Structures are given as structure tokens and as C-alpha cells.
Amino acid sequence: MLGVIIYLCTGPLERADQTASVVSSLAALLGVPPAAVVLWQLWHRRPVTSRSVLEEAAGQLAVALRNQWDAEASVRRINDPYPLPVAWQPADSELQEHWPHLRELARSWPGGPPGDPARWPQDASGLAGQGAAIGEMFTDRVPTRRLVILGEPGSGKSVLLIRLLQDLLARRTDGGPVPVLFSLASWDPHQPLQRWLAEQLRHSHPGLREAATVTTDRSRPGDLAEALLETGRILPLLDGFDELPLHLHPVGLDALNRALSAPRPLVLTARSDAYRAALTGPGTALRLNGAAAIRLLPLDAEQAAAYLRRDTGGPHTPGAARWNAVIDQLGTASPVSQALSTPLGLFLARTVYNPRPSTELHHATPHPDELCDTAAFPDRAAVDRHLFHAFIPAAYTPHGPRRPRWSPEQALRAFTFLASFQENHCHSSPDLAWWQRRRVVPTTIRCLIGGLVFGLMGAFAGAVGGWRCTRGWAGGCSHGLMCSPAGGRADALRRNTCAAPRLAGRRFILDAAGGRTCGRSTGYRHARSYAENS
């Protein structure tokens, strides 16, 4: 390659022109066989249709999910020092199907009910429970295995859903459905639910892109993600129904009923007021067909006090005594009591005020007594704001032999920026989709950078062919910089969607190849033109 460049740079311009053309053509031809192999693999993958392969894929997915959510539970400290015993009771009757109807509905399904009718309670009050009973309640006590979990903000809906997922994975036998947690915040109810679920599976588990024949009314090409969904091997755990735009709640319920009809098991979480508004709003009243519903209860004062003391090492440790003033107010109407009545509030408080063993207890460590100051915190909202503000510095304080990669100040700036981006550009969605991070950079800056890069590429190619032309470099650069912003702007307008990563990757490769070709040819032509006219 070095010899070719020297040859181009020392020979006559006409010979350099001819040689550069030949070399470029040969380089392009050398890239054809690998591209053909890749395309053949993409479009001619042998479909997988056997039941054993689907069972194997489901088993591998279950193992991957078990590892994933065990790690997630560790990060969230769900089991440190022990899981909070969140309790629940049946939701109001207007938010769920009537109990006799649920029992009859399950008995009427083809193949019989999904569970043992002898385990069903006589009425909805038999659904009440707490903590680890969530898995047994869902599989044995809900006749249809369709459940709505309702609760206030921070009441523990998502954590309880994780515990349910882990319990179902532990109970799963060969051939049983695999519970998968999906966050509804990124779902558009106008988009077919099954298609969206399949896309989420592909994003999280790329191995499910493997080709398979999807068999419904007729066989058609598809992949393992679609096949697992359509054969009922996925049990959807849908988190965050209330995070959909408010006006789309009735549309979302209708879409759920259409895509996941009554015989299909599922779990849905939502805030109580949002779900009630969706069911009782103007127009036709809707509810999730064939579903029972439970409502999470506030934490008991004694349970919260025991949890705070245990997190410090035990009730008789010096750390536990730090909480005496706060514990005295639990169960009252004080702001601190209201704030610590939910698992989220309790988690924030213990993270902020319970120092880890490797952190020295000194004057800079905040003391929980400040939460009892009604002058500084006159209501629950003030306590909540304080806990949220103090959480990131506490979470990024060094607690072990390895210091965090970021300082608390850096983490606070980064998370503030991401929160602003999600608020302004992603409809307040809490989901961080990596293929949308390019939108953090303004379109104008992306266009200018793209124009500069392709202009320089074209100028460099032109300068190699006509290096003795003093205006070759300037001509190639100026033309590339003048033309590329318009092309970049048109490309940005065309791309102004949240494209899926696989499709975005293909478009990037094609566009990059096209841009490289156009930049090289344009820069070279203008360098040559300047040289001939000089």
C-alpha cells in the first residue's frame, strides 16, 4: 500500500489518475465477496421449526433471565438485609372482574383451567398476602393467571414484579412459559403489541434473532422471538402502564385485550389512580379482560422500624440508636412518617443515613434526626425532594476497596443531563435506549461534523491524485464542506425517528459506504479539475 502511494505521488498526473482509478476499482471488487457472504447469511438463514429447538431456546432464555435479575436484585439491594415484606389486599371490585365470573371463565377455557380449582379461594379476599407469597398467589389462587398489581408511587410495584419473576423462574418446569419483564414506557399503543414484544426480546437477547418458522394460520418466515411469543412460551410481565401518555390509557387497555386475549397469562402493574381513570373515563368503560387485581398497602410502622434497625446491624447497635427520633414518629401523620411509609422512601433513607462499614462515621455524615425538622421539611413532598437530592451523593460515596468511576458531582451532572434529555426528547420515558443517544447531539452539530468529515475524506482522496496541484486540497475541502451540510440535513430529516438498532446499523453501513464513495470521487474530480486548469 505504501508503495502504491509513493508511486502515485511521484509519477505524472495522467499515470496517477489511471492508477488511482484501477486501484479503487480493485479495492471495490475485493470487498464484493465478503459482502456477498454476509448478505447470503442474512437472507438465507436456515429456519428452525422443531419443537425441541424452541424448548431449548426457552430454557436458555430462562437461565439468562435468572442470572440477569439475580444481578439486578443485588444492585437494587432487594435482599440486603432482607426483602421488605410488602403486603397487598384485593383491589376495589370495579377495578377487576367479578370473582364468580373469573372462576367460571377459567373452567370454560379449552383444555381446562391453568391451575387446580381446589386451590382457588371462595372470593377475592383470599388473594391477600405479603412478600414471598406473590408467586404462590399468582399461580395457585388466581384462576385465570391474569393479574393487575396496583399501588401508589414508590409502593414497591416494580420490586414485587421482580420477586414474582424470580419465583416463577424457580418454579418453572420444562415446557413451561418463561416470565419476561417488559417496561411499557417505550410502547406506543398504536403499534401492534406482539411486534413490540418481539422487538424488545431481540434488543435484550440478540440470540433470539435466529431464524425460525412462525406457525399461525399459515407458516411464514420469522425468528425465535416471534416463535416463542406466538407459541405461548413467554409470560409477559408488563411494568408501568401508568407511564404511557394519559390519553392513551384506554387505547392501551384495548390493545392489551386484543393482543393478549383472556386465555393468555399476564401481569400488569399500574398506579391506582391512573388505572381507575382509564376504567372510569368518558366513553366505553374498559378493564383488563379476565384479570384479578390487588392493591399494595403502606408499610407497617413496626416493619419499617425493624428494617431500619436491622440495616444498621441490629436493634442494639450504635447505628440503630441514630434512628430513635425518626422511629418515634413512624405511624403518625408527620411528614417523615408519610415519606417512609413506602419501600422507595425507606430505601432512600437507609442509603442516605446508614453509612456502609468501610465509610468512617464523622461529622460530615448526615444524621436522620434532620428529617424530623418540620421547619425544614413541612410536608411529605419536602422530605421526598430531600431524599432524592441526597441519594446520588450517598450512592457514589466510596464504600469499598474500589472507588466509583465517577465522583458524586460528575454523576449528578450526568444524571441531570440524561433526565432532561428523557423529559424533552423521549416523552419523559424512564427507559434509556442506546440507539437514541445520538439524538443528544443537536442536529445542526451532527450535520456540521458529518460535512467536515466527508469533506476532508474527499479532499484527501483528491490530494493523493493531484498532490502537485496547490489548489487540489482547497478545492476538495471547499466543495465537500459546501455540499455535505445539505446532504446531512436531508439525512437528519429522514432519520428523525427512533429506529431500531438493527435497522439503524444497516443504514449506517450503507450510508457510510455511499458517503465514502461520493466524497472520494468528488474530491478527486475537483482536485483533478483544478490541476488541469492551473
Image: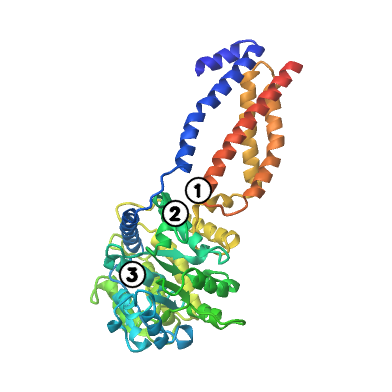
Query: Dot 2: what SS?
Result: helix
Residue kind at label 2, given as amino acid type: Arg
In the image, 195 versus 417, the foreground residue is 195
Q: Position of residue 163 (x, y in %)?
A: 33, 69
- In the rendered structure, are the residues bearing label 2 and label 1 in contact, judged by CB atoms less than 8 Å apart? yes
User: Which residue is at 59% across, 11% downward?
Assistant: 10
The 10 Å Cα crowd at callout 2, few under 14, some 14 to 19, many 20 or more, is many
How far is disc 2 from disc 3 in space, using C-alphas?
24 Å
Q: Which residue lies furthest to the front in this view?
A: 218
Say above or below: 51 vs 333.
above
Is residue 98 found left or right of 63 in the rendered image? right
Residue kind at label 1, given as amino acid type: Arg
Q: Which badge, 3 or 1, comes first in the chain's sequence? A: 3
Q: Which badge, 2 or 1, comes first in the chain's sequence? A: 2
Residue designated by label 3: 163
How far is disc 3 from disc 1 in space, using C-alphas?
32 Å
